Image: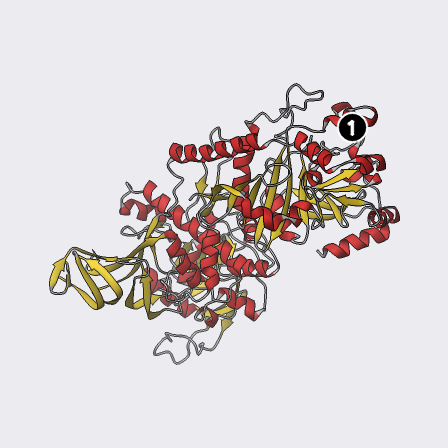
Amino acid sequence: MEINEFFNGQLAQWPEVRQRYDDLAKVQTKTFVENGLRVQWNPARMVSTGAKIDAKSLEKRPCFLCAANRPSNQFSELMEDAVSGEQYELLVNPFPILPMHFTIPSKSHQPQRIAGHYPMVHQLTAKFPDLTIFYNGPRCGASAPDHLHLQAGTGDSLPLRQHWTRLQERLKTIFAFDDGDSMALLTDFSVPAFVLRSKNAENDRRLFEKLYHRLETTQLSTPNTQHPTPNTLDEPMMNIVAWREGDTSVSVVFPRRKHRPDCYFAEGDDQMLVSPGALDVAGLIITPLQHDFERITAEKAEKILQECAIDEVLAQEIAEKIVLDNVSAEKRDGKAQKSPPTVTVGIVSAQEIHFSLNEPYSVDGIEVEGAQTATIENGAIVWNEKRYNQLIFKPLSDEASFTIEDVTIGVDFHWNRKENQTFRGMLRLTIDDDKILVINELSVEQYLESVISSEMSATSSLELLNAHAVISRSWLLAQIEGKKRNSEVENSEKSIQNSTFNIQNSTLIRWYDREDHALFDVCADDHCQRYQGITRITNPLVAEAVRATRGQVLTFSTPNTQHPTPTICDTRFSKCCGGRTEEFQYCWEDVVKPYLTSVECPYCHTQDAALIRQVLNDYDQETPDFYEWTEVISSEQIAEWLRSKHHIDLGNITDLIPLERGKSGRIWKLEIVGTKGSFTIGKELEIRRTLSDTHLKSSWFEVEKVENHHPSPNTHHPTPNTQHPSPTTQFILKGKGWGHGVGLCQIGAAVMGENGKKYDEILKYYYNYAKLTTIY
């Protein structure tokens, strides 16, 4: 949406309001040299300044922010909160203070209350970086306290923003996340305020909630005044002014203790109709009466603001309590860790391992560097002519790395190949049956830099990388948590749980998850997440994405429970969903995961080669037809695959019958019919493996059967000694998508990022009902 076009289009259709904006250019203003405050004489604002907001008055008048009561020539543009799904409407404010002034009400009629809706402030600063966003509490300048709304406008003329370069140099930090997002106290202004500076939307939300919680427990009404305004009926009294500085959202929160100053209610010459809202406390005081404009002084203006705001003593007290709140929280749950957990990754196993320590490592108390070889002999690891059950090489610096030769990537896939790969962190060699297993141990954040570089190409956009950092971290930590929960379950039991084969009914329903990873957390290949060390870290944005989302995961709490405990989401993802994502239970265990619902994905149907290269690495680009594809296979091929992969002879294959499909259309149960019987297989990966040398791209396909009276030239196993070969059957599989299709569609997410969607919006789209949470 082009904001100027929307604004100008509205004024062109609403002459009365256009005249008010023309008049606004002529209004008188004055600036006080003593304190930098500005005063605007604006007669049109009498509607707001003099508004009655008591319960009886609100009941009598129709809500002017509800669509049914708005003028027919007032335009609206629909917007959505990417976190809550709440819908808002963008409206031109018919009684402007600023040269371009908007009101942004919730589409639903609900009380003015910022709790639970603050993330929209951060989203608006990102969506409209040239505008200032502001919020008036229900007793802090809002003329419609019965209807939730924000406002926005061209706010560069606000004294708060004009003097910000100087003001921010004297901020006092109260709390900061490791990535630099912080809360600070502002005292070098007319009134005290709290400043939230965040690049990360989730951090911004958490900072605001810390402040909101503390304001809730602080008595902000002023006792023993002529017109005290208790804050217990609505919310902590506050105004918010927010804007964008580069990639950082700045929110200035002004706590209040009073709705209107005493002079508002005075009589005669003592009366001055000033009812401060967000713009007033930001230094632009609005007077609807010329008489008030002419006689207000710098001292009087500052006194009005200070009377309604909290003082520096209370502000400092609130700041100190926020610091104590954070310390208490860390002591209480012990989970607020600054350092990420570690992860163990299985790299490769072989009877002989060739590797190089590129910097000094320590093993057995000695320093080692350079080319190394380890072999297995009679159940022991042999290295430097000594025998070990396990060898641990510890790095002597953060930058130390090691290189493993002949690491297989794409195990069982058609791009299978070997390459040398370099890793940071600790190297462990241990025995797994009759082979040496290479394990890399490192921090989760270091691991993620490699995973995202391995999964994404160096041309990926930052929003795609941010989204992938969150889901890769979530998936990994969910697997580690699951492994801990299942630590008492024997491998044999896990195997039974993950593979069901009933010979009598000729049915094989099998899914492949993590049951074979007993000695490490995750493997380094597509079975888990691609992890190729620092071999492919070529994009500096990857490190930025991991840093910007540090500790962020998606969590889910089961609704309708008395004490819901959030768990980390098992965030699956695939290359290309083919137009609709699939649900978890059709690919793996029969468990419904509410955050992995099936959604339409119109984004991944793209021919943009540059965008596709964001997702597909060099060897992935060897697969061009991933959205729609066709495979032609013969009955002889299928029969041979059944014999070699499942040791089953069905004779000549006569039909492929899809029995069950998931929400996306992917087949999860398929009957293979032959002249000697039939065989039913599932789930989706078992089907893909059975009907291909390696894998079909997905199990979302339609089957077309063609009778061919001549043997297929591509038949791998022609029937020998047949002078007149019998007719052969070919199956044309017309499919969609690449991968299981569950969760985030990588190519779809790339398109969304290019279309301006932020990473939290991308995550919200593919993982509905999940919540973005920072856990360290």
Instruction: From the viewer's perspective, tell me whether residue 473 is left or right of residue 379.
Output: right
Task: Please state which of residues 762 and 39 is positioned toward the viewer in this rendering.
Answer: 39
**Residue 235 in view, yes or no:** yes
* Three-letter residue code for mark 1: Lys
Q: Quadrant of residue 686?
A: bottom left
Task: Please state which of residues 601 and 546 is positioned toward the viewer in this rendering.
Answer: 546
For the image shown, how many numbered marks are present on the structure? 1
Residue 37, horizontal then vertical, whole percent: 70, 42
Residue 564, horizontal then vertical, whole percent: 47, 33
Instruction: From the viewer's perspective, tell me whether residue 257 is left or right of residue 336.
Output: right
Q: Secondary structure at mark 1?
A: loop
Residue carrying label 1: 52
- Residue located at (29% from left, 58% from top): 397
User: Most extreme residue toward the bottom, as rendered?
Assistant: 723
- Residue located at (81% from left, 23% from top): 267
Task: Please state which of residues 662 and 449 is positioned toward the viewer in this rendering.
Answer: 449
**Residue 648 in view, yes or no:** no
Q: How is the image coloured?
A: secondary structure
Q: Is residue 432 above or below residue 314?
A: below
Q: Quadrant of residue 241?
A: top right
Task: Please state which of residues 567 and 182 is positioned toward the viewer in this rendering.
Answer: 182
Q: In the rendered view of the protein, which quadrant contains the N terminus?
A: bottom right
